[in-house]
Structure formats: C-alpha cells, structure tokens
Amino acid sequence: MANRAQHITVTHVGSLVRPPALIEFLEKIDRGEPYDEAAYQKCLRDSIADAVRLQAEAGVEIVSDGEYGKTVNWAFYIHHRLSGLEMRALTPEETHDPAAVIGGRDRQAFPEFYNEYDRRVLRATQVPVRPVVTGALSYRGQAELQRDIANLKAGLATVDARGFLPVVAPASAMPNVKVEYYRDEESFLFALAEALRQEYRAIVEAGLYLQVDDAFLPFMYEKLVPPMTLAQYRKWAEMRIAALNHALEGLPAERTRYHICWGSWNGPHLFDVPLKDIVDLVLQVKVGAYSFEAANPRHEHEWQVWKEAKLQPGQYLVPGVVTHSTNIVEHPELVAERLLRFAGCVGRDHLMAGTDCGFSQSPLAGRVHRTIMWAKLKALAEGARMASQKLWG
C-alpha cells in the first residue's frame, strides 16, 4: 500500500452509486424479471470502465470497480458464491428472535425514524430471510469473481491508477446465520474462512489490492451488549478476527487492508461501540492498512485514539476524511485539517486519505446523489494535496 511519491495517497472504501443504465438491469434482476444477459454484462463492463476513469479524473489513485458486480450488497453477495448454504424466509417466531433479525438498540430507541427510513431505503420487495448452513461450506463464485477482476483490470489499463476489490470478512458474511451442519460456532467460522480465502487469494494473485470489509464486527456491539458485557463481546469479536487472520494467512500484508465502520447507515448511531474499546482488536488483523470512519460526527473525535494506538512498521491508516452520509461536500481545507491530525499521530509516511464508507448502501440505493459523490472525491483529493504540501513542502 506504499505511497509512490512524497504525498498522501488517495483512495476510498469501494462502493459507488450505480449509473442509471446499470440500475435498470439491477432492478429487473431484483424483481426476478427476464433481462438480456449479454446486454447486462456489456453494461457492467462499460459502467466499471467509466467509474474507473471518473475516479482517476477526480484524483483517486487506488480505485475500485464500484462494487458494481454485486447484485445484493457489499456483504450478502457472498451467499450466492458459497455452497452448503440456503436462504430461508423467517418464520413468524423468528421475526421476534434477536439471533435471526439484523438490528439493535438504535432501532428500539428510534422506531418512528426507522419506520420512515426503511420505506425510503429498503427495497419494497424485500422479504426477511436468513442464511442457513446445511452442509460443508465451499467457494463456488470463481466465475463471478474472475469477471469482476477482469472488468476492473480492463478499466485500469486506460488510466494511471492502481486497483482494489472489496470483499466480505467472516464476521460480516452471515450475521444472522443459522448453523445446522457444523458442531459449533468456531468450526463454522473457520470453515467459512477457508472458503473466503479462495476469494482473497485470487484478488491478490491478479495483481490487485484486497480490502476486507467488516462493518458487522463493530455494529454487533449494539445488538449484543447488553445482555453481553463488553468483555464477552470482545471474546465474540476475537474469535472472528482469528478466523479472518486464518483466511489472510500467506497473503502479503502490503497488498491487503481492513475496513470497519459502525453499520454506516445515516441514522442516529447512539449505541456504537467506542473505537477505544476495540482498536487493539482491529490492530490484531494482519493487514497492511486499516480503513475506518473518521468524518462521521459520531466518531470524528476518536482521532485522538491514534495518539496511543501503535501501528507496526510498514502499516498505514486510511481514515475516512470525507463522509458518505450527507450530500454536503466537505471543504478541502477541512479534509486537509483532518489528515494533518492523523499525521500528527502516526506520521506522514503511514497515512492515506479515504472515505468513511461506501457511497452506495445497496445496488439500488445510493447514500448521496451520484453527481455529489464525484464532487466529494474531488474534495478528498484536493484536501490530500493541501495536507501533503504542508507535510512535505
């Protein structure tokens, strides 16, 4: 992940708002309607090529495919790439079971807000389901993964940029899973890690950077605590981090990064776990860079955690200095100010500029308007240039 020159490298978290032409196909796929497969694949290739170009033009140096190839979302795409798994609609009893339903104390505290939010953001056709592990887990998504790799590399061939692909961590792949096959939770998690390892390795072997997304690791705190204590939650998280490290084993750290957020929807987030309570766990993940929310007003003050938390030699911070949750475009001077704070904590040579989270919550729902997204990325790059000028002269 090293900087190529004496400046702060610019990247982002991955998911971009889909263009209108691609959304037309995704809506048909979502509704189970017939569509022209060849036309869809061409639209996907063209959309990714355009997204790569626009990222580079905005000043982003390590770009993604926008996660355009994922027709569910950033995490649950993996359900279609695994065998040994089936999706079942929740029974009436399960709709009241905390283990089956994704949601925590924020929803309990602000029910009126979430009733309105769900109607606006969630798909009207969505039926509550949960993954059920009925057999040995194995990876079967090679064709889709190779398509995503090829589409991103084709786009990269036309610009001066490097590329990364975001994929899901074991803790976030199936947060409401029901396990019927494995003898215990640990056996399930390490089997899942073995399957995900194929995806991780293929991305690195293709010459791309690997980003592992793990929003559910911090988010589950508000769901689990209480009744769990913080200590019990940390043990829950440690097992999942051990599984992730198993999946990462043998991969060069400099080609990998780890992204966390706190669920990252634009809601109250009143019950998020403080970064100080998990930063040591995050740093146990054996990667070269750590991406996290730092422009989010619920967590921006936590930059001070990095005065004490220590990186290993060669590691980077990728703080979010532009947020995905508002259509207000950050001023480049504010972006620079945020970056300089982190440079004061970890040093200029251990810093990259990123975003809080992805700009699109799902293939059909962007968090900000697509035109504003590009303006935010330009502000990110301009702020990084301003900070670099002060740091290197």
Image (tube, rainbow, N blue to C red):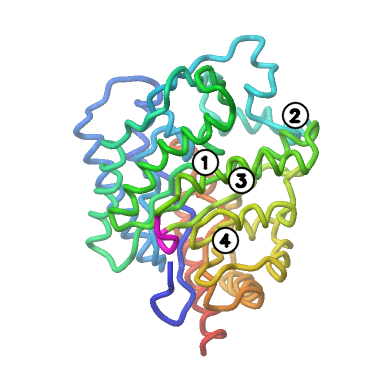
- Three-letter code, disc 3: Ser
Residue at 53%, 42% (x, y): give it: 243
Closer to the eye: label 2 or 3:
3
Closer to the N terminus: mark 2 or mark 3? 2
Q: Residue at x 45, y 49 (%)?
A: 248
Residue 39, image x, y percentages = 21, 34
Q: Quadrant of the rendered structure where residue 297 is?
A: bottom right
Identity, as a three-letter code, of the amino acid under mark 4: Val
Look at the numbered discs 4 and 1 and tell me whether their residues touch, using CB distance below 8 Å: no
Looking at the rendered image, the disc whose residue lies closer to the viewer, 3 or 4, is 3
Specify the quadrant of the image occupied by residue 163.
bottom left
Residue bearing mark 4: 322
Q: Is residue 372 visible?
A: no
SS label for mark 1? strand
Q: Which mark is residue 361?
A: 1
Per the image, is 19 magenta? Answer: no
> Where residue 139 sits: x, y (%)?
36, 32
Q: Residue at x 63, y 72 (%)?
A: 342
Dot 2 amino acid type: Pro
Q: Please, is residue 256 above or below residue 16 in the view?
A: below
Q: Earlier in the sequence, mark 4 or mark 1?
A: 4
Give the side of residue 93 with respect to residue 132, left or right: right
Crowdedness near tag 2: few (<14), some (14–19) or many (≥20) residues, C-alpha within 10 Å: few
Earlier-in-chain disc, 4 versus 2? 2
Marks 1 and 2 close (CB-CB < 8 Å): no
Q: What's the magenta bit mostly, secondary-structure-wise?
A: helix
Report how far apart the C-alphas of labels 3 and 4 lie in the structure: 13 Å
Q: In terms of image quadrants, where is residue 343?
A: bottom right
Query: Label 3: which residue?
Result: 264
